[in-house]
Image (cartoon, rainbow, N blue to C red):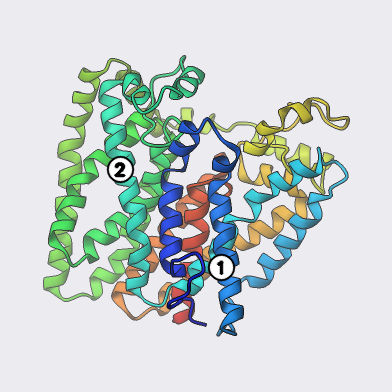
Amino acid sequence: MDWRLRGSPLFFLPLKVATFVVFLYIGFDGFFKVISNYHPFVHVGADILVVALCAKALIENYLYRRKPERLPPFTLLFAFHFFWVLINIFHPYSLSLFSSVAGAKVYVSMFTLYFFGFYLVKSVKDVHFFIWPWIGITLVHTFTGVYQGLTGPDSVLALHSRYSVQLSKFADQAFRPFGLTNLPGAPAVWIFLVTPLVVYMIFNNRSKLMRVLMILAAPFLGLTLVLCQVRSAIFKTLFGVSMYYLGNLVRIGRLSWRRAAYNFALTSLLVGSTFYFLPQLTNYAEDSYAENVRAVERSLTTFEYDSMSHARRGAWERFTKYLVEVPFGAGLARVGAAGGAFEKLRNRDPYFSADHFFADNFWIASLVELGFPGMLLLTFILFGILIRGFFSLRDQKDPQKRSLQLAILSALTASVVGLYGAEGVLYNPESSFFWFFSGVLMRLSSDD
């Protein structure tokens, strides 16, 4: 099945390029939402584009009578998942049919990118093609975030006056940079997702200039993480990079002494650059804007066990409570972003009070909205992808491919580790990144 379409007039772009453009849109989706005052079409713009990609792929492959050479791993589980979501649209506890459809999109639209990741990637070069937009967008958010952190809220308002609404919601907290997103601290999410891929590119990119530029960018990535104060993102960044480095120790041992020495030199340069410049940049940020002192203090609590261990207290108790109350779920749009959008319906709900369910955890959110069977299906898919990716590393003979698989696996594992205190794989940018690169990882592991 050749998804690299040639000369098709449909949507004007080949599918591979169109997917690249969708990622660019997702990169600045939050900014578009704010300046449009959350116009309904812009609010679901990324979902509309992904649905258009699916339609394009299906129509063109039908017209050319192409058949897939093979199905991606876990296709059957995905089929069961989509069927279960469809059933839950008509759940007896549903707030309304419209709210259920709106709530269903977080479990469907970005999940389909898994199949795009599997079929659009034919080589390491193809993977690099899709990595670069994510790195580029992350750097834009990083340097915009650094500027905002140094100058304060006025720099955010300079983007658009409507940012005043977002700023007012968090007025009692230390200021967090927005980058070009719609949420304070959101650049940290991009950073933790992309950092393992940045480190991979430092070791494997052919351009020495790009290597040097990314090494120099590393302290700014660290500074943005500190200013954003998203402690889970700091932890996941450290987890992903550590996993990549530890996994690469085996690969380095198989290299020639010259190549191993070169990799050691790059590592020393990367670590040295970060540890030398990051404290200086942090001190400069504290002197530039007084609120940054509070931001740095909060970020440093990431390394305090008592503070982190109490951050998500009560999750297990809520899980067991909801499992008994609603083993088959309470319907879609109960929690998360969709839940907030239909607050009026929840206030009139005859079954549960508006604030009855509280998630802040992937497994609790999926339990409440899809029930235990739906949560179990998603758990099998998530851990199946990671386990298959892990075991495929042992059989990978190509050193660059192995390093690439390891970088992707490190980023995906960091996402899953963080699901205890977040619902990231359901919401962009983490959702589109996770499911697309899960498909890429399965393609690389299947090629073994």
Q: Is residue 11 left or right of residue 361?
A: left
Question: Secondary structure beneath disc 2?
Answer: helix
Q: Is residue 158 visible?
A: yes
Question: Secondary structure beneath disc 1?
Answer: helix
Please give the residue where the numbered disc 2 appears in the rendered image: 140
Residue depicted at x 54% and y 47%: 45
Q: In this orientation, which residue lies closer to the viewer: 381 or 81?
A: 81
Percent x, y of residue 156: 36, 25
The amino acid type of the residue labelled 1 equals Lys
Q: Is residue 73 visible?
A: no
Residue depicted at x 43% and y 29%: 184
**For residue 23, which quarter of the picture?**
bottom left
- Spatial distance from mark 2 to mark 1, Cα to Cα? 30 Å
**For residue 190, which quarter of the picture?**
top left
Percent x, y of residue 214: 21, 51
Please give the residue where the numbered disc 1 appears in the rendered image: 56
Residue depicted at x 41% and y 60%: 20
Residue at the farthest front position: 9
Instruction: Look at the picture and state if 239 lies above or below 279.
Output: below
Percent x, y of residue 337: 62, 37
Q: Is residue 208 left or right of residue 65?
A: left
